[in-house]
Amino acid sequence: VIPPPVIHIESYSEDSISFSLKMTTNIKVSGYVVNIYWTFDSHRQEKRTLVIEGEKSIQKVANLTAHTPYEISAWAKTELGDSPLSFVHVVTSGTRPAAPSLKAKAINQTAVECSWSGPRNVVYGIFYATSFLELYRSPHNSTTTAHNITVLVQRDEQYLFLV
């Protein structure tokens, strides 16, 4: 039986998490697959996937959001097959940024200018869809460090926007 890997949180800050991965077995490990999950504004679950080569590993994941719960799951790729998943949960330190105040204005039938307020020097995600279900499951999205963006949409549709 292949055991799940051990995920140990080494440290965390407002915008990063460092963790180590190891196996408690003599089975040869060729690497790990790690998923980092978080929920954005209770509407959209985000995921970042890391493919890591080698037996032992210390990883640092940066560009995270302060005071946000993250779930890290990992499995090992071994000579006998994939291991079961293991999970850890961690909440980054600091104060979560306030939600930006979004304004969306149609420029024409296929373009919408989105603008918002908020801190500088951060990355914003803009999500948009024609229904709440689509906004939750598979929205169109874009990222920017600016405080405005023009998105192209289909004509004759109503859209929901989230930043």
Image (spheres, rainbow, N blue to C red):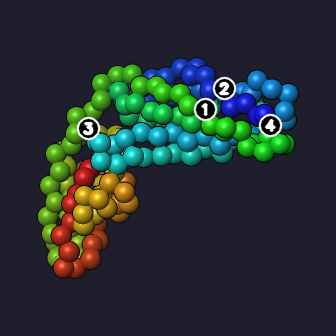
Q: Is residue 128 above or below residue 21?
A: below
For marks 4 and 1, give the one nearer the viewer: 1
Residue to which mark 1 is pinned: 86
**Mark closest to the chain's N terminus, 2 or 3:** 2
Label 2 to label 3: alpha-carbon separation = 37 Å
The image position of residue 133, as x and y in percent, is 29, 59
Residue to which mark 2 is pinned: 6
Q: Left or right: where does residue 99 sit relative to residue 26?
A: left
The amino acid type, in three-letter code, at marker 4 is Val
The amino acid type, in three-letter code, at marker 3 is Pro
For marks 4 and 3, give the one nearer the viewer: 4
Report helix, strand or loop for mark 3: loop
Q: Left or right: where does residue 157 sit relative to residue 64?
A: left
**Mark closest to the chain's N terminus, 2 or 1:** 2
Q: Which residue sits at x=76%, y=34%?
A: 2
**Mark closest to the chain's N terminus, 4 or 3:** 4
Residue to which mark 3 is pinned: 119
Label 2 to label 4: alpha-carbon separation = 13 Å
